[in-house]
Structure formats: structure tokens, C-alpha cells
Amino acid sequence: MKLLLDTCVLYPTVMREMLLGAARLGHFTPLWSARILGEWERAAVKLGPAGAAQATAEIALIRANWPKAEVAPAPGVEARLWLPDSADTHVLATAIAGHADAIVTVNNKDFPRHTLAEEGLERLGPDELLYGIWLQDSTGMEALGAEVLAEANRLSGGSWEIRPLLKKARLPRLAKALSSSL
């Protein structure tokens, strides 16, 4: 299954790490465009120079780790597409060009299901997707959750627990599922 990851699910660190971790486990093939990664980089600038530098480094790493994930939108496709926010048509065009099965986003209003269905695509929320993967592979997702939790605690110097960490990352169903084991 090929899934186009929208900027809004790549930019938050914990959500990105859970999604890409699930992809590393073989549950889906991630896709994005240079423009999507550029949006992430521009959003991180708001955090200051350190945030921008971190985003640049993380984008370089995911490009290195997923060299076939970056897709260019097909020429001319974007011009025929309509979405409520025209600034998002590049996302849909990239999904079409990459032969994606779905777009993973939290921007539900900007990606109406009926519009995506016309292009043979679904819209998935990251929590919905990751919870579904957990139902299929609880062992793998528990190990991934433990890795993400350990890294969050290392980076923050804190003592996060999995449920509050994932709830803060807008992954409440996955948080509840993993909290019984971690």
C-alpha cells in the first residue's frame, strides 16, 4: 500500500516517527513531494534557527532513508483538480502521480472523501491508520512505541509516558492501545 504523507503529519516529530516507523516495519510505502518537504521546512523556521536546522537535517535523513519516496506531481494534473483549499491541490496531484492508495492527513476539510474517491484515493487520519496497523501487528507497534518513547525522553530530558506522549501527538486511539503494554 502506498500512502502520500501530507506536511501536517510529517512536521510533528512524534507523529512522523510513528508513521515512518510503521513504514519501516513494512506496513506501507511512504510518498511525499519536494514541495511537501519544503512546507515542513518553512513551518519549522517559525521555531527559530535551531528548529529550521533540525528540520533541514531531518528532511535530509528521510530523503536518504527513503530515496524512492519523493514523487513529482504529474505535469498538467494539478490544473484539472479542485480542492476546497487550492494550495493543497499539489498534494492530490502528487498522490495521483505516485499511484498512492490514500492521503494521510489531519486536514479533513481540505481533502473531502468524495473528491479523493473520484481519483481512486482514500483519506486516512494518522491515528486511524496507526491504530489499524496496531490491530494487525501489536508486537511491532509496541516495539516502535517503546523506541519513540525512549527517544522523546532522551531528547526532552523528561519522563514521558506513552499515553500522554501519543495523545499530545494527536494519536489518542494508538495511545490507549499502547498504554496497556508500555
Image (cartoon, grey):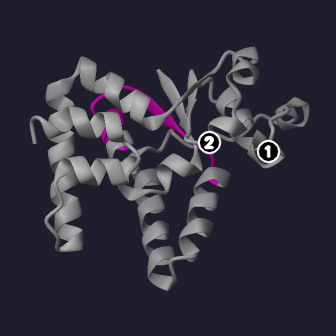
Disc 2 designates what residue? 107
Q: Secondary structure at mark 2?
A: loop
**Residue 18 in picture, x, y percent from top left:** 32, 43
* Residue displayed at 69% across by 33% down: 111
Q: Does any portion of residue 24 appear in the rendered image? A: no
- Residue 92 spot, x, y in % from top left: 71, 34
Say if 24 sits above or below 115 in the image: below
Q: Is residue 88 left or right of residue 173?
A: right
Q: Is residue 49 above or below residue 127?
A: below
Crowding at mark 1 (Cα within 10 Å: few <14, some 14-19, many 20+): few
Which comes sooner in the sequence, label 2 or label 1?
Answer: 1
Q: Is residue 135 above or below residue 16?
A: above
Can the viewer see residue 154?
yes
| Residue at x 62%, y 51% (from the top left corner) | 36
- CB of mark 2 within 8 Å of CB of mark 1? yes
Disc 2 crowd rating (10 Å Cα; few below 14, some 14-19, many 20+) is some
In this rendering, the answer to whether 181 lies above or below 15 is: above
Residue at 76% from the left image edge and 16% from the top image edge: 118
Which residue in the structure is indicated by mark 1?
Answer: 85
Which residue occupies the extreme left position in the image? 181
Distance between the alpha carbons at the discs numbered 2 and 1: 10 Å
Mark 1, secondary structure of its residue: loop
The residues colored magenta run: 20-34
Q: Nearer the viewer, residue 16 or 162?
A: 162
Q: Amino acid at mark 1?
A: Asp
